[in-house]
Image (tube, rainbow, N blue to C red):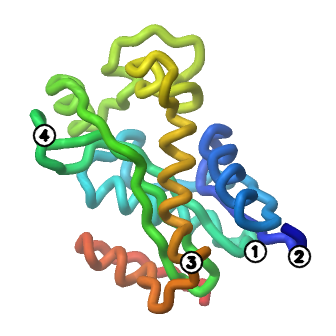
Amino acid sequence: MGGSIVRVAVGTSNPMKVRAAEIVFKAFMNARVVGVRVETGVGPQPAGVRNVLLGALRRAVDSLRGTGADYGVGVEAGPIEFPSSTGFLETQVAVVVDRGCRAGVGLSPSFELEKHVVEAMIVGVELERVAGVERHVPLGEGIGFIGVATRGFITRLDLTVQAIAMALVPFIAGYRGLISVEDLAAQVDAELECGLA
């Protein structure tokens, strides 16, 4: 793992997400990872594939602006449409963007939530507020709802690591023809200019 240092900016001030990116990138390269505060435009609790993906994509792109980083990482969590008892699964979506404005997308393992929880999240209430579980630190920065639900067997850090690793696959495997930021945004009927290349 020698060689030059790869700079990675994570679009968040959440130390757990920064730690997850550190774990993933340092497994594959000599990386220096920092968190960068960004605005997503999707609110504190996005819901639906479009909003969760756009939140992650904006975090990734905006973390690159002005930082000089080689990669930007965005992670967003929320219920996305999928056949289930509520029609949604709680999922972490990660997007990795390079300075050429090429994007990789990854998902975490996903799970069902109760109907009243999903209904509240769809109108913007954060999972930790509606879940009604005891906690000493905010769930988003601790073990997460999944950690409480699985009694610590799987934590939010685990899910975030897996989502980021999946988003990094096209880069570490050397895929040709990665999707551009603009084309990825267009797939969910949104416009987003990368403007870094």
Find disc 1 in the rendering and name its residue: 68
Q: Nearer the viewer, residue 15 or 176?
A: 176
What whole-number distance in Å separates the C-alpha atoms at marks 1 and 4? 42 Å
Which residue is pictured at 64% across the width and 56% down the height? 10
Among numbered discs 2 and 4, the one appearing first in the sequence:
2
Q: Position of residue 82 (x, y in %)?
A: 17, 49
Q: Quadrant of residue 93?
A: bottom left
Q: Quadrant of residue 85?
A: top left
Find disc 2 in the rendering and name its residue: 3
What whole-number distance in Å separates the C-alpha atoms at marks 2 and 1? 18 Å
For the residue labelled by badge 2, is the local secondary structure a helix, a strand or a loop? loop
Find disc 4 in the rendering and name its residue: 84
- Direction from residue 113 to residue 177 in the image, left or right: right
For the residue labelled by badge 1, is the local secondary structure a helix, a strand or a loop? loop
In the rendered image of this protein, does residue 62 appear above or below residue 151? below
Which residue is pictured at 57% across the width and 83% down the height? 174
Find disc 3 in the rendering and name its residue: 173
Q: Amino acid at mark 2?
A: Gly
